[in-house]
Image (tube, helix red, strand yellow):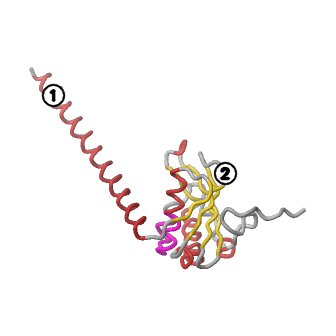
Amino acid sequence: MRRRHRAAAATAVAAAVAAVGVATWQLSTGRDELRYADDYARHEPLRVVGYPSVGSLRLTQEVVWRLADGSSGELADLATSDGSAAEAKATAANWVRSFQQGATGPVAAEFHDEGSVRQTVVLYFERTGQVKQLNLRLDGNAGSDGWRVQLREPDPKVAAAPPTWAPATPGGPLPPTRP
C-alpha cells in the first residue's frame, strides 16, 4: 500500500515540476514576444532587400532598435560568443555613438548570402547616409543559442567605417573591384 502512495506522490511531484517548468517557459517566451511586438510598434519599419532567414531578420531588427534606443548594454547582449564581454560592450557603445541618430529614421537592410547559419547584412541609414555591415551567425552548440551579431570592433574608427565592398544604395550594383 505504501508503495502505491509513494509512486502516486512521486508522479504528482513530477507532474507539478513539469507544469511549473512549462509555465515558466511560456511566461519567458511570452515576455520575449511582447517585447518584440512593443519594439515593432515603436520603431520605423525596416525595409528589406535580399533573402533573410526568420532569425537573421529578427536579429537585424533588434540591432537597429537597440541602436535607435541608445541601448548599448542590450545591444552587447546580442553578441556572438567568439569575443570577450568587454569587446562586445566597447563595440556596442561605439555603434550606438556612431549610428543612433541614423537608426531613429528609416533604415534599409540588405541581406547577402543564403542565411541558413550565417549572413552578412548591410544597413543603410537614410537620415544620415551612413552604411554599416553586420555579421550574423547562429551561436552556441549547433546554433542552440540562436542568431547573434558579431561585436568585435572596439576601435571607434573601425566601428564607424562603411564597408568598402557594399553597394552604395540598397539593391544597387556592387562597386567595381580594383586590380
Q: Which residue occupies the foreground of this view, 129 or 67?
A: 129
Q: Is residue 37 left or right of residue 86?
A: left
Instruction: Identify the residue at horizontal 51%, vertical 58% (top origin).
Output: 59
Q: Nearer the viewer, residue 22 or 152?
A: 22
The local crowd at label 2, few if under 14, some if 14 to 19, many if 20 or more residues have their Cα within 10 Å, is few
Magenta segment, prevailing SS (helix, strand or loop): helix
Is 72 rendered above or below residue 150? below
Look at the picture and state if 3 lies above or below 70.
above
Residue 68: x and y in percent read: 50, 73
Check the picture and name the quadrant holding the C terminus: bottom right
**Residue depicted at x 35% and y 52%:** 29
Side of 104 relative to 117 (left or right): left
Badge 1 amino acid: Ala
Quarter of the rendering occupied by the N terminus? top left
Q: Position of residue 126 (x, y in %)?
A: 60, 75
Marks 2, 1: nearer the viewer: 2
Local SS, label 1: helix
Which span is picked out in magenta? 62-75
Mark 2 falls on what kind of element?
A: loop
Residue behind mark 2:
113
Measured Cα–Cα span from mark 2 to mark 1: 55 Å
Q: Amino acid at mark 2?
A: Asp
Residue ID for mark 1: 8
Taking depth in this image into account, of 141 and 106 the one nearest to the observer is 106
- Magenta run includes residue 63: yes
Q: Is residue 55 left or right of residue 124?
A: left
